[in-house]
Image (spheres, helix red, strand yellow):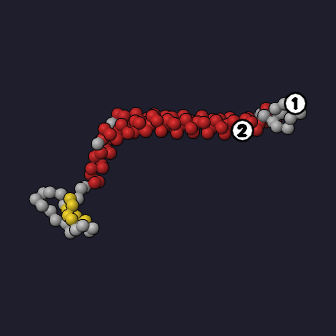
Amino acid sequence: MQAEFGGALPLHNDNKNNVELPMIDIHSTDTQRCERIRRNPKFLQLVSSRSRLAWTLSAVVLGTYYLFMLVVAFAPQWLHAPLGEHRMLTLGMPVGAAIIVFSWLLTGWYVYSANTRFDALGAAIIEESK
């Protein structure tokens, strides 16, 4: 049941209490707020710094893995070298494990940055958009 009162907001019926409440055009309100956020210089800074960090860390991880694959393909003798005299473990195993740990550390760095710097900047942007 919708009625309109002299240019006021349309009303809708709340079935629980049979109370008429004004309907708010949420779509236009959200659209305006999103536009304010997109124009905010802090939002542009957030997008830029987050993208730069993500792409840089991705390139470092991929570069590390591809370098390892190049060594496997073109200089496998480096990875076949034993860690010590009369040892069965070769250099390739700890190097491979170190690459995995390095990737975890870079992921941790991104998560730390996202939870501190990026979240603080995002909260400031949202607060300004209210």
The answer, for residue 50, to whether it is visible in the render is: no
Q: Secondary structure at mark 1?
A: loop
Give whichever of discs 2 and 1 has the lower sequence position: 1
Where residue 27 sits, quadrant-wise, is bottom left
Instruction: State the quadrant of the C terminus.
Output: top left
Q: In this rendering, which labeled residue sits more in front, label 2 or label 1?
A: 1
Where residue 36 sits, quadrant-wise, is top left
Instruction: State the quadrant of the N terminus.
Output: bottom left
Residue under the image location 82 percent in, 37 percent down: 89
* Residue lying farthest to the right in this orientation: 86
Where residue 7 sits: x, y (%)? 12, 57
Where residue 32 sits: x, y (%)? 28, 46
**Label 2, label 1: how many angstroms apart (C-alpha)?**
20 Å
Residue under the image location 83 percent in, 33 percent down: 82
Residue at the disc numbered 1:
85
The answer, for residue 75, to whether it is visible in the render is: yes
- Left or right of 108: which side holds 121? left
Q: Nearer the viewer, residue 101 or 41?
A: 101
Where residue 20 sits: x, y (%)? 20, 64
- Left or right of 7: which side holds 126? right
Q: Secondary structure at mark 2?
A: helix
Residue at the disc numbered 2:
96
Give the amino acid type for the residue marked by disc 2 in the picture.
Gly
Q: Residues within 10 Å of mark 1 (few under 14, many from 20)?
A: few
- Left or right of 128: which side holds 4? left
Residue under the image location 49 percent in, 35 percent down: 113
Where residue 35 sits, quadrant-wise, is top left
Give the amino acid type for the residue marked by disc 1 in the picture.
Glu
Q: Residues within 10 Å of mark 2 (few under 14, many from 20)?
A: some
- Left or right of 89: which side holds 48? left
Residue under the image location 43 percent in, 39 percent down: 119
